[in-house]
Image (cartoon, rainbow, N blue to C red):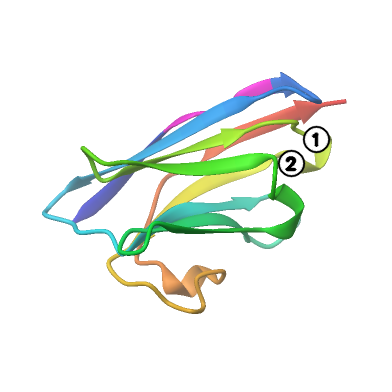
Amino acid sequence: QVHLVESGGGLVQAGGSLRLSCAASGRTFSPGVMGWFRQAPGKEREFVTVFRWSTNNTYYLDSVKGRFTISRDNAKNAVSLELNSLKPEDTAVYYCAASPYFSHDYHLPYAYDYWGQGTQVTVSS
């Protein structure tokens, strides 16, 4: 079984920054992709960003482009997410997600096999 362990998150004022981290542990796991979704109260889970291991390509939700940056830890099966210029509408529970395979449906939750427990990001205005 693969476990995704998240850290980071918290409360920040609008315009501030946070850093989230996610590491995969458990049985041998070779990531195809690792990334993040988020879910605000009363809303569906939404794709945020993903890192594709084989090509180092990254993909982002349009509304976070230029503000969020996903990066890979080459020594570990881990990713970090830098959240800058945060806005109140970024408030959500952020979930790490991973799969051994890349799918062109990477923006949909069903394309991922493993999920973290979620970490809260709250942006005050």
User: Residue 53 falls in which quadrant of the image?
Assistant: bottom left
Q: Are marks 2 and 1 in contact (CB under 8 Å)?
A: yes
**Kind of residue indicated by mark 2:** Asp
Instruction: Give residue 55's position: percent from left, percent from top.
Output: 36, 63
**Kind of residue indicated by mark 1:** Lys
Q: Residue at x 49, y 57 (%)?
A: 50
User: Residue 17 falls in which quadrant of the image?
Assistant: top right
Q: Residue at x 74, y 32 (%)?
A: 86
Relative to residue 15, is residue 30 depicted above or below? Answer: below
Instruction: Give residue 98's position: percent from left, percent from top.
Output: 37, 58
SS at mark 2 in the image:
helix
Relative to residue 82, is residue 42 depicted above or below? Answer: below
Relative to residue 41, is residue 46 depicted above or below? Answer: below
Q: Which residue is mark 2?
A: 90
Specify whether residue 5 is painted magenta: no
Q: Residue at x 79, y 25 (%)?
A: 15
Q: Which residue is mark 1?
A: 87
Q: Quarter of the image containing the N terminus? A: bottom left
| Residues at marks 2 and 1, CA–CA distance in whole angstroms | 5 Å
User: Residue 23 falls in which quadrant of the image?
Assistant: top left
Q: Main secondary structure of the magenta part?
A: strand
Please give the label number shown on residue 72: none
State the residue in front, 44 or 68. 68
Residue 124 seen in the current view? yes
Q: Quarter of the image containing the C terminus? A: top right
Residue 41 seen in the current view? no
State the residue in front, 32 or 66. 66
Instruction: Give residue 32's position: percent from left, percent from top.
Output: 31, 64
Magenta extent: 7-11
Decide if residue 69 is on the left or right side of residue 2. right
SS at mark 1 in the image:
loop
